[in-house]
Image: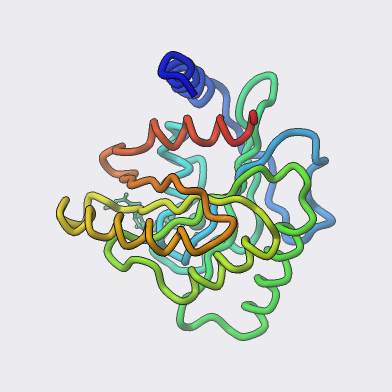
Amino acid sequence: MSEIADEELAERARKLFAGPVEFLKSAPGLEFLPDPDVPEVAFAGRSNVGKSSLLNAITNRKGLARTSNTPGRTQELNFFEVGSPLQIRLVDMPGYGFAEAPKDMVRRWKRLVNDYLRGRSVLKRALVLVDSRHGLKDVDREMMRMLDDAAVSYHLVLTKGDKVKPSALGTLYETTLTEAAKHPAAHPAIFTTSSETGSGIAELRTAILEAATT
Ligand SMILES: Nc1nc2c(ncn2[C@@H]2O[C@H](COP(=O)(O)OP(=O)(O)OP(=O)(O)O)[C@@H](O)[C@H]2O)c(=O)[nH]1
Ligand SMILES: [Mg+2]
């Protein structure tokens, strides 16, 4: 893509996310999904990695998606509508990998997320969030395999970048790139972000718009 086209896309993304964004619904099961009539981009990641915070940062709305310190707060697929007329739905998926999760909750999570990933024709891309302080964990690798198997293209997104030193973040970025290259559905572009400082957020907006429109 040319530089001018890049800049145009970035500007369109900025405008889009500065415009109307609304919570649509929580879907505890596939029967509650909205009609598949617009492109969707889904947020995945370990519980507490900062999915809801990132969604709020991307849309410039503090309280749009509920954030908390209690792991496992989000248990449904939460749909947010972007643009008027409607252009994209963002999907906040339930977090995974917290220690005290009861087994049947994990089973339910797997079924809901797997069915959604495999069956959703309008799902254009997923973002797999990874805490910059911890890097990729086995539960993330499992998520990546689920996406590989469902052939859903995804970006790895390092979150909470404000919590680690720039040098450590650089190293983590490199090792994460290397690991992503081994996964068939992982997109080569990886993002480093902070919902706290806003770093990397504009780039992610552009990537979301690009995923939804190509
Ligand atoms: N310093 C810092 N803290 C963050 C950042 N993003 C999220 N947090 C904090 O991390 C905690 C968890 O954030 P959430 O956005 O609720 O995480 P989540 O992934 O939605 O969690 P679940 O819904 O339980 O899966 C909150 O206390 C946030 O304030 C960030 O970029 N920087
Ligand atoms: Mg959340």
- Seen at 42% across and 51% down, the residue is 157
Question: Horizontally, is 66 left or right of 196 in the view?
Answer: right
Quadrant of the image occupied by residue 80: top right
Q: Position of residue 132 (x, y in %)?
A: 30, 59
Viewer-nearest residue: 16 or 184: 184
Name above or below for residue 176 compared with residue 91: below
Give the vertical position of 176 relative to 198 (above or below).
below
* Quadrant in the picture for the C terminus: top right
The residue at the point 44 percent across, 37 percent down is 204
205 lies left or right of 87: left
Q: Residue at (47%, 66%) from the top-left corner?
A: 46
Comparing 26 with 82, the one in front is 82
Q: Position of residue 53 (x, y in %)?
A: 42, 48
11 or 6: nearer the viewer: 6
The spot of residue 41 in percent (x, y) is: 61, 43
Colour theme:
rainbow
Residue 56's x, y, as percent? 45, 40
Quadrant of the rendered image containing residue 24 = top right
Residue drawn at x 47%, y 30% is 206
Is residue 204 rendered to the left or right of residue 166?
Answer: right
Q: How many marks?
A: 0
